[in-house]
Amino acid sequence: MTLKRALTIAGSDSSGGAGIAADLTTFHEFGIYGMSAITTIVSMDSAWNHHVFAVPMDVVEAQIDTILQGVGAISAVKTGMLGSSAMIEMVARKLREYKVCNLVVDPVMVCKGTDEPLHPEHTVSYREELVPLATVVTPNLFEAAQLSGMKSISTLEEVKEAARRIKALGPQYVWITGGGAIGDKTAVDVLYDGKDFHILGAEKFDTAHTHGAGCTSSAAICAGLALGRDVLTAVKDAKRFVTNAIRESFPLNNFVGPVNRYANRREQF
Ligand code: PXL
């Protein structure tokens, strides 16, 4: 059996819930051979403040070349935390150079728990360089507000307006998540293809243990695309995958609770 291959260009969350740990384990659950280019390393101190260390640009570039040039036949690529405007621009240049076509862009801007301020220049680089290349861009409500230039998003109409504005930047599909704040009993996420809105609802959980949900969901979409599924199917599958993972999320320590990607297994070995 030939395994499909996917690449994640993202940060390492040392605590294992988000970033490349989320991406590679999600790829694995979908039966995809996963590879990574690590852009940043995130550590946590004893009060669980996050510290973000950038990997040197040439080292990131060398990893991307290893996979897109040295390995090849990559069916889909996902981007996660990139950490600087220069990194966002370099990654966009590489993806253009290698003509990557199944691309999921998770426009990570800050991670909860960092004392890092928001960098508006990252938003500019995302809008101008990376989002236009995306097959699917997967902002949460906060990222959608930044990318669309809206003050805040708290109603379904505002989610749709943000989706229209982000679609105008050039991606093929916009998938806005985090709809727990929008729905009443269900979490509401919205997929927009420039013509139709698909409003997808899922069970809403009363838990703070959702660390890694965004990365997991985007990685699952990337895996679906790598398997040759259409975007709507990949998004629906990803939503089911992450919903199961949130249902079985757990406290890792006093500060953080990651989603549980094993929740999708029916057999154990
Ligand atoms: O969930 C956002 C995120 C993405 N990538 C990395 C992270 C985090 C948040 O902690 O550490 C590497």
Image (cartoon, grey):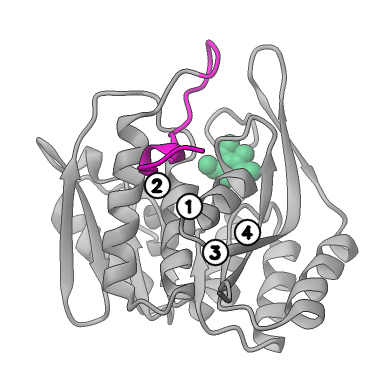
Picture quarter with the N terminus: bottom right
* Mark 2 neighbour density, 10 Å: few (under 14) some (14–19) many (20 or more): some
Give me the residue at 56% from left, 65% from top.
Answer: 78
Residue 162, quarter of the rendered image: bottom left
Q: Which residue is mark 3?
A: 32
Q: Which of pointers 4 and 2 lies earlier in the amino acid sequence?
A: 4
Q: Earlier in the sequence, mark 4 or mark 1?
A: 1
| Mark 4 → mark 2, Cα distance in angstroms | 16 Å
Q: State the SS at label 2.
A: helix
Can residue 109 be seen here? The reply is: no
| Of labels 4 and 2, the one closer to you | 2
Drawn side of residue 63 relative to residue 146, left or right:
right
Residue position for label 2: 142
- Which residue type carries mark 1? Glu
Residue 113 location in percent, x, y?
57, 27
Q: Which residue is mark 1?
A: 29
In whole angstroms, how far apart are the C-alphas of marks 2 and 1? 28 Å
Query: Looking at the rendering, which quadrant does residue 32 occupy?
Result: bottom right
The residue under the point 41% across, 56% down is 139
**The image quarter in which residue 235 lies:** bottom left
Expressed as whole percent of the image width and height from the top left, the position of residue 44 reads: 69, 24
Q: Which residues are magenta?
A: 252-269
For the residues bearing labels 3 and 2, Cβ distance under 8 angstroms: no
Regarding mark 3 in the picture, which secondary structure is present there?
loop
Q: Per the image, is 150 magenta?
A: no
